[in-house]
Image: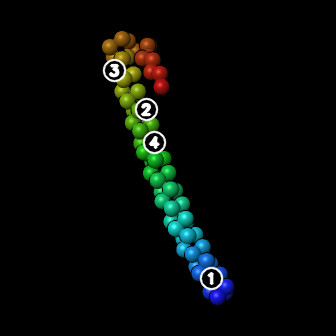
Amino acid sequence: MLKLRVEELEEEVTRQNGVISDKDEEKREAIRQLCYSLEYYRSEYRQLVQTINKVYRRRHGHHRHAVIVS
């Protein structure tokens, strides 16, 4: 009877380890997606700053730059 209980508990531990592993992979994927999103928005921000600076220089002369604080 004790041996049967030990086997049941070992199976439960194995099952729970699988669930934990799946959750870990889901978290890693979420982090990857967030990293891609962050890089996309950083890139878009840099492009926006460049565009603003170009427009500013056209309107106010080539030697001055708009100040963008992030």
Residue at 39%, 36% in the rendered image: 44
Q: Secondary structure at mark 3?
A: helix
Q: Secondary structure at mark 1?
A: helix
Q: Nearer the viewer, residue 31 or 51?
A: 31
Tell me if mark 2 has few (under 14), some (14-19) or many (20+) residues whose alpha carbon lies within 10 angstroms of its own: few
State yes or no: discs 2 and 1 in contact (Cβ < 8 Å): no
Q: Amino acid at mark 3?
A: Val
Q: Is residue 68 above or below residue 33?
A: above
Reading the chain from its start, which is encountered first: label 4 or label 3? 4
Residue at 46%, 53% in the rendered image: 30
Reading the chain from its start, which is encountered first: label 4 or label 2? 4
Q: Nearer the viewer, residue 18 or 42?
A: 18
Q: Nearer the viewer, residue 30 or 56?
A: 30
Reading the chain from its start, which is encountered first: label 1 or label 4? 1
Label 3, label 1: how many angstroms apart (C-alpha)? 75 Å
Q: Give the image location of residue 12, x and y in percent.
A: 57, 75
Numbered badge on residue 55: 3
Label 4, label 3: how many angstroms apart (C-alpha)? 26 Å
Tell me if mark 3 has few (under 14), some (14-19) or many (20+) residues whose alpha carbon lies within 10 angstroms of its own: some
Q: Which residue is mark 4?
A: 38
Q: Which residue is mark 2?
A: 46
Numbered badge on residue 32: none
Tell me if mark 4 has few (under 14), some (14-19) or many (20+) residues whose alpha carbon lies within 10 angstroms of its own: few
Q: Is residue 65 above or below residue 50?
A: above
Residue at 54%, 74% in the rendered image: 15
Reading the chain from its start, which is encountered first: label 3 or label 1? 1
Q: Is label 2 or label 3 in front?
A: 2
